[in-house]
Image (cartoon, rainbow, N blue to C red):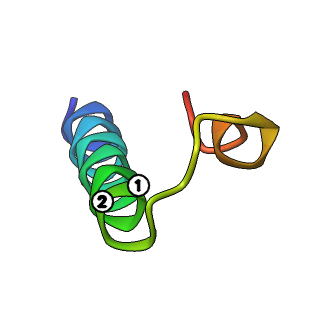
Amino acid sequence: MNQLNKFFEIKAFVADFVTWIKKTIHFDNSQSTSVFYF
C-alpha cells in the first residue's frame, strides 16, 4: 500500500511539474508534451 501511495504522489508531482513547465515555457499542446501524460 505504501508503494501505491508513493506512485500516486510521484504521478501528482509530475503532473504539477508538467503544468508548471507549460505555464513557464508556454508549450503548445502538441506531440512534444503529450509524452508526459500518464
Label 1 element class: helix
Look at the picture and state if 15 lies above or below 27: above
Residue 30 x, y percent position in the rendering: 71, 36
Task: Kindly check if marks 2 and 1 are in contact, taking CB atoms under 8 A apart as contact.
Answer: no
Crowd band around label 1 with a 10 angstrom C-alpha radius: few (<14), some (14–19), many (20+): some
Nearest the camera: 21 or 5? 21
**Residue at 35% in and 42% down:** 11
Query: Quick one: which residue is furthest to the bottom in this view?
Result: 24
Question: Mark on residue 28?
Answer: none
Image point 31% across, 42% down: which residue? Answer: 3
Q: Which residue is mark 2?
A: 23
The part of the image, by quadrant, that contains residue 36 is top right
Residue 20 position in % (x across, y down): 27, 62
Q: Secondary structure at mark 2?
A: helix
Residue 18 is labelled as 1
- Asked which quadrant contains residue 27, the reply is bottom right
Split into 4 quadrants, where in the image is the C terminus? top right
At 21% across and 46% down in the image, what residue appears? 9
Query: Mark 1 or mark 2, which is nearer the start of the sequence?
Result: 1
In front here: 28 or 36? Answer: 28
The residue nearer to you, when weighing 2 against 7, is 7
Q: Position of residue 19 (x, y in %)?
A: 31, 50
Residue at 24% from the left image edge and 42% from the top image edge: 12
Q: Amino acid at mark 2?
A: Lys
